[in-house]
Image (cartoon, grey):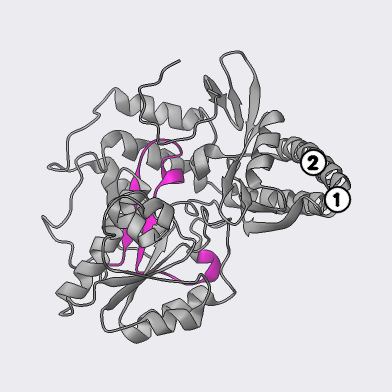
């Protein structure tokens, strides 16, 4: 069948008609275990009744009014996010890339209104992923995303992830901020060295820089805390959120301290759809669920169980799995065979997962997953690894 969609995705020939909890169903009734969650989006799984109710109720009221008027649902969501975080102020938009654009503009504007307009450059890290706009691909710095789009947007200096000395050397008279994912998702579920984030905070304080955390993938309980920065005990000045904040409904948010956001006055930034009543209703419902007593404890318990079971698989299939890494329910399997082969084998087991950099398979189940569903997932992962191990043994035997 001819598709009129722009062919920018290498799509799998698989479509889902509906979902329920951690499961996805095809039109033919085949059931798949979802260990992708729309790439860390569907934190509450599929067709969560509270989210369906919130969206339906709001749809019967008002969908869009624009930011020319007050949006009470957005004011409530901003107040709740600030109460639960370091932030004093929030700007809503529609995606993670937009949240990062706002964060970058805010950092530059802060330095400008502070009397240092020359401090527009931002230090970023190799292996990062910050979005697909012209600015965020420049911040990401990956050649495959930059190629063919003309000169990269100026203002970003990349250094190796986790290399504190390289960060120190990169700081110059034009440096205004440091931008980092507290755990790299697309880069391969890479966790920074102990105390690295704390050291960045100290560098920023010492040099008059802003610290920006990209929590688009790690935010909203994915790593076992509401926000990943809370694991390290290090608060940023600016933080970008998206993905799980809407648990499937498009939303992005840029959170900041009052000081960091002091330059963003009327007319400096905007969004037609950002903060629309539908998105605000859903995101408030997401917070209702995630902030319930015991929810984050459940994420931690399921994370511990999953990591323990995956460690057993690694020991059993050492020729296939090189490492289990990550925090919370952002888990990575670094593979010996190509990660894509493991993704294919899992799909044969009717389990959907996604590859990442550093030859890693990301396991991103909905945060509502239970012990029995983890047991089912582990059995499927084990069978997939067993087949890859057999292929490895056959190839080794043939080579000898």
Q: Position of residue 346 (x, y in %)?
A: 69, 35
Q: Is residue 315 visible?
A: yes
Q: Nearer the viewer, residue 98 or 14?
A: 14
Q: Is 148 located above or below residue 234 in the figure?
A: above
Q: Secondary structure at mark 2?
A: helix
Q: Which residue lies most toward the bottom here?
A: 206
Taking the spot 26% from the left edge, 54% from the top edge, the residue there is: 150
Taking the spot 30% from the left edge, 82% from the top edge, the residue there is: 208
Q: Position of residue 198 (x, y in %)?
A: 49, 77
Side (left or right) of 76 relative to 13? left
Question: How many residues crowd around disc 1 within 10 Å: few (fewer than 14), some, or many (20 or more)?
Answer: some
Marks 2 & 1, CB-CB < 8 Å contact: yes
Disc 2 from disc 1: Cα separation: 9 Å
Q: Nearer the viewer, residue 342 or 2?
A: 2
Numbered label attached to residue 222: none
Magenta span covers which residues? 230-257
Numbered label attached to residue 382: 2
Q: Which residue, given by chain and number where applicable, does mark 1 sit on? A: 316
Q: Secondary structure at mark 1?
A: helix
Taking the spot 17% from the left edge, 38% from the top edge, the residue there is: 66
Q: Is residue 78 visible?
A: no
């Amino acid at each position: 069948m001819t598709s009129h969609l722009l062919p920018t995705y290498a799509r799998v020939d698989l479509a889902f008609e509906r979902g329920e909890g951690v499961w996805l169903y095809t039109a033919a009734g085949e059931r798949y275990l979802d260990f992708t969650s729309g790439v860390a989006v569907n934190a509450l799984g599929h067709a969560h009744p509270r989210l369906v109710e919130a969206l339906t109720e709001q749809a019967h009221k008002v969908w869009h009014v624009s930011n020319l008027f007050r949006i009470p649902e957005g004011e409530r969501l901003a107040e709740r996010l600030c109460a639960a975080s370091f932030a004093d102020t929030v700007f809503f938009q529609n995606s993670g890339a937009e949240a990062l654009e706002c964060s970058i503009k805010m950092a530059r504007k802060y330095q400008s209104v502070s009397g240092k307009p020359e401090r527009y450059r931002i230090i970023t890290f190799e292996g990062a992923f910050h979005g697909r706009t012209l600015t965020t691909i420049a911040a990401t710095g990956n050649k495959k995303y930059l190629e063919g789009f003309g000169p990269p947007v100026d203002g970003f200096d990349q250094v190796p992830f986790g290399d504190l000395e390289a960060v120190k050397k990169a700081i110059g008279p034009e440096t205004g901020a440091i931008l980092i994912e507290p755990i790299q998702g697309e880069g391969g579920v890479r966790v920074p060295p102990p105390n690295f984030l704390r050291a960045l905070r100290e560098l920023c304080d010492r040099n008059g820089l802003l610290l920006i955390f990209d929590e688009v993938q790690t935010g909203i309980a994915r790593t076992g805390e509401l926000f990943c920065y809370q694991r390290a005990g290090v608060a940023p000045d600016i933080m970008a959120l998206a993905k799980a904040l809407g648990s499937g409904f498009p939303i992005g948010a840029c959170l900041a301290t009052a000081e960091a956001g002091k330059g963003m006055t009327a007319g400096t930034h905007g969004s037609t759809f950002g903060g629309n009543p539908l998105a605000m209703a859903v995101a408030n419902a997401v917070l209702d669920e995630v902030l319930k007593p015991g929810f984050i404890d459940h994420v931690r318990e399921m994370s511990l169980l999953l990591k323990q079971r995956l460690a057993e698989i690694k020991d059993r299939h050492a020729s296939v799995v090189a490492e289990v890494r990550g925090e919370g329910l952002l888990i990575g399997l670094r593979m010996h065979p190509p990660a894509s082969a493991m993704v294919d084998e899992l799909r044969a087991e009717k389990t959907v997962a996604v590859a990442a950099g550093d030859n890693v398979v990301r396991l991103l189940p909905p945060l509502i997953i239970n012990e029995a569903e983890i047991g089912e997932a582990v059995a499927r992962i084990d069978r997939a690894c067993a087949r890859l191990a057999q292929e490895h043994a056959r190839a080794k035997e043939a080579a000898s």
